Each structure stands twice: as structure tokens, then as C-alpha cells.
Amino acid sequence: EKGRRLLRRRFLHGWPTVVTPHAGEAARLAAPLDLPTDDQGRLARLLALAYGVVAVVKGPDTYISDGDTLVCVDEGTPALAKAGTGDVLAGALGALLAQGLDPLDAAVLAVTLHARAGRLQHAAYDEQLERLSPRAQRRAHDERDQRDEEELARGEAVDEEPGDGHHDTVDQHVDGRHPLRGAGRDGERVHQL
């Protein structure tokens, strides 16, 4: 209740606000307003409209909306389904906002950079594993897989797979196979920063 009052006050004052909930947090924001939560992209758009914010609904596919525009960044990785990584995203987003970027552009750039950093970290971890004995590699992989499964079960990441057909409502799309500027997947326009 207090959080919703603060969001309302920020909206009434015209202060740009970006919220970055994962699926579980987004569902809690949606519940008092009876917003549907079955489509993460639609949920991002509805939260943005309902609260007057830029909504970043995080998961393997992260949806960002200001209510008018919906952008999907599908570069998620289990490496980002860890406690504290959302704080890193919030810090990057805050730094971009402090430089004067538009809130939607800042959110898209922060999410994209955050996802790519997660992928790089994941690759570096795998590279380190290659130096271990085969037995130690299997144990490390098993431990990482178990941690990932536990974090998914706690709702710290959306359990959808990228590319599962949820892009039909997306206005703009950013994915790992294309630069931030230019043609997106299936001819969709990539968000121009």
C-alpha cells in the first residue's frame, strides 16, 4: 500500500519512475488492480499504464514498457537468476538516468547491458570449469544447475523459455543476434537508442 502511494505521488508530480520487478513482484503489483499476469509483455504494459511508470518485468525474456511502447530483451540467462543481480541492474539503470537518458531508453540499455554481462560471466565460469578434472566439472555443473532450479522455484526468474511465441504483442525487440540499431528478429524494428 505504501509503495503504491509513493508511485502515485511520483506520477502526480510528473517524476519519471522505473520499476524493475521479477515475475513474482510484478504479480504482487498487479493483484490490487486485478491485472492479468499470464503474459509478461502485456503485464509490463499494464503496470506501466496503471502506475504511470516505466515497467521492467524481468525474466529470461525481459519486457520493458512505458505504456505506449513495449520492448522485449531476450538475452536472459540463469546466471542472472541470482539474488543481488537485480540490484546491479538498478545501479546501471540509475547511472543511465542520472546522465539524462529518457527512462525507457535507459531501461532498455541497462537491461541489455546487464544481460550481456551475465552471459559473459556465465561463459567465463564455463571456461574456468574446463580447467578442472571431468569429475570436478560434473560436480560444479550439477551444483550450478541445482542452484538455478532452486532460484527458479522461488520465483526469482520467469520459467518461460525465450522464443516461446510471446513476441506477437511486442512493438520492438532486442535480441543477442542483432545490434541495438537495425533490423530485429522476424523483421521487427529494434528499439533505437
Image: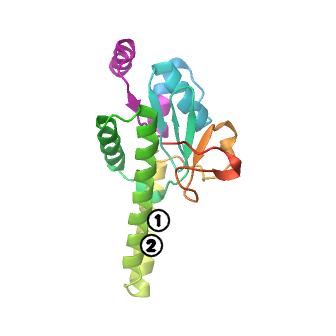
* Residue 167 visible within the image: yes
Q: Which mark is residue 141?
A: 2
Its colouring scheme is rainbow
Q: Nearer the viewer, residue 42 or 29?
A: 42
120 sits left or right of 59 in the view: left
* Residue 156 visible within the image: no
Q: Nearer the viewer, residue 96 or 129?
A: 96
Q: State whether residue 124 is above or below residue 167.
A: below
Q: Residue furthest top?
A: 12
Relative image position of residue 103 (x, y in whole percent): 41, 32
Instruction: Tell me if mark 2 has few (under 14), some (14-19) or many (20+) residues whose alpha carbon lies within 10 angstroms of its own.
Output: few
CB atoms at circles 2 and 1 under 8 Å apart?
yes
Q: Amino acid at mark 2?
A: His
Relative image position of residue 35 (x, y in whole percent): 57, 23
Q: State whether residue 144 is above or below residue 25.
A: below
Q: Residue at x 50, y 54 (%)?
A: 76
Q: Amino acid at mark 1?
A: Asp
161 sits left or right of 141 in the view: right
39 sits left or right of 86 in the view: right
Check disc 2 and report its element: helix, strand or loop: helix
Relative image position of residue 126 (x, y in whole percent): 42, 74
Please provide the residue range marked out in magenta.
1-28
Q: Residue at x 59, y 49 (%)?
A: 160
Check disc 1 and report the residue beneath it: 145
What is the C-alpha distance between the residues marked 2 and 1? 6 Å
